[in-house]
Image (cartoon, helix red, strand yellow):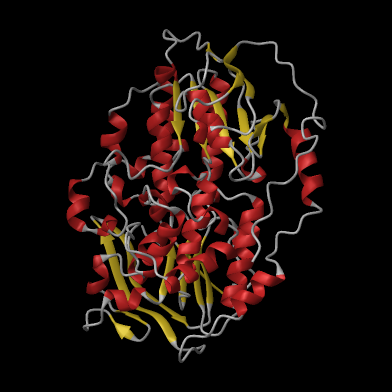
Amino acid sequence: MGRLREEQSRKGWASPYKQQEYKMHNIIEINKAVARMPEFRLKEPADVVIPADTPLAIVGLNASGKTLLVDMLTGAHPLLGNEIKYDFSPSASNKASQNIKVVTFRDAYGSTGGDFYQLRWNHGLQEDSATVKDILKTASSSDMLSEELSQVLGLEPLLEKKIIMLSSGELRRVQLAEVLQSAPRLLFIDNPYIGLDVNARKQTSDFLTKVAEKGKTTLVLIVSREKDIPDFIQRILPVSNGKVYPICDKKDFLAHLHKEEKSVSYAIDAERRNAILSLPDHENAANGSPVVECNNINISYGSRDIFKDFSWTVKSGERWALNGENGAGKSTLLSLVCADNPRAYACNISLFGCKRGTGESIWDIKKKIGYVSPEMFRSYRRNMSVLKIAASGLSDTNGIYNREIDGDAREKVMFWLNIFGIGNISDKNYLQLSSGEQRLVLLARAFVKDPELLVLDEPFHGLDRERRELSRSIIDTFCSRKGKTLIMVTHYEEEYPSTIDHRLRLKKLG
């Protein structure tokens, strides 16, 4: 079936750029560094210098080695020798643990330690969960943060809100605020803008600019897409195919990247497209019949109204773009559609012609729905093979699929893993994958039962351009089949597939 092409060839990648000579204090230096554990090694020993008080972006495709490099720099993966040097001055301590912080946006909600996929919406659990104020008050404050967190990150309306009830974008803002309050000397931030709406991305970028200008914390962003490199960052540390390249000027990096991408096609190849189109249609598959019917829905959390007299109908064969600012209710609406929110049973909702609470099985409904979301990504911290993680989509279990995968199930799962170009890693441990590869696995999981309704909530978080465009092409092809319906959420307009023909924009109430 073919797989994603290998990492773009970077022959001579170092040569197009002028290696920058930074005559300043270096906060971290590693020379010919090799991780102690073989399974956590880059393909080549790494030479890296992180200059102090100089914001930097580590940029590379998914699975290029960005996370491995950061783990080496922070001590998460110990090195074979004494190849690493820290100088955190003017910090009072030279301990890495006290001076280096990492924000990955992959943690479960706050410090609850719980797995809240599906259970997130349970009223009893939210009663016991911490508020944003509880989380933030535990960290020491600085003058800059105490004045600007509420304004720039928009935290004031969230302070009394339960952590478990935050939207994906809201949660990211709180996590960022929490770690910045500890005033780290060096802060690594993995994909800081994913899950944020346009205004929130600008607010966050403005705030990070002020943090960088302040000079107390050196910022290093880890990104997979060049559009997520903010204006205040002018120096790039390229990583490609397990190799780390010298720091270069952003302008040179982007010029070289765009030159390479002009000659690259990211669309799905004919073989995989034909394979998808050749799949048999579901019995009685047809366009036009109601798939989702919401009639005068009312949802509130505490004193805050999420939906008031909300009605919406989605018909078979329609492809919907669902958007709106962070906290507008997108995830809540999808939780109602996917039967994860217990409040669905108090609402006038019908799925596939069956009204909730009239005796139908949740699992009969879920058989027809393929789903992926940021919450699902955070909940899948399972020490299992890629094959079993993807196979869990056949029964909608949350990462638990310990039964023997028979021939028919294996064939279905391998089909979609190959479609997404990751069939070659089916036996690999899921937790050893890059975050981008994990995203692709969960995307494949949403397709394995060939669902009638595809619900994709921010499906491309952290994916590089190649994998985003490939995934868009797969979605377009899938939705061109009879009786296939799509509801998709993203804050990036260019990520919507071309087949989108309906739009719904949600607005915050009050």
Residue at the bottom extreme of this rendering: 284
The quadrant holding residue 355 is: bottom left
The quadrant holding residue 408 is: bottom left
Depth check, front residue: 385 or 204? 385
Depth check, front residue: 42 or 140? 42
Quadrant of image for the C terminus: bottom left
Depth check, front residue: 425 or 307? 425
Residue 165 position within the rendered picture, expressed as x and y whole percent measured from the top left: 31, 51
Quadrant of image for the N terminus: bottom right
Q: Is residue 349 left or right of residue 225?
A: left
The residue positioned 53% from the left and 34% from the top of the image is 68
Residue 284 appearing in the image: yes
Depth check, front residue: 191 or 408? 408
Q: Give above or below for 68 relative to 457.
A: above
The quadrant holding residue 451 is: bottom left
The residue positioned 50% from the left and 63% from the top of the image is 444
Q: Is residue 1 left or right of residue 139?
A: right
Residue 191 position within the rendered picture, expressed as x and y whole percent measured from the top left: 53, 41
Q: Give above or below for 363 relative to 143.
A: below
Q: Give above or below for 378 relative to 456.
A: above
Residue 380 position within the rendered picture, expressed as x and y whole percent measured from the top left: 38, 51
Residue 324 appearing in the image: no
Q: Give above or below for 2 relative to 154.
A: below
User: What is the total number of numbered labels drawn onto the structure image?
Assistant: 0
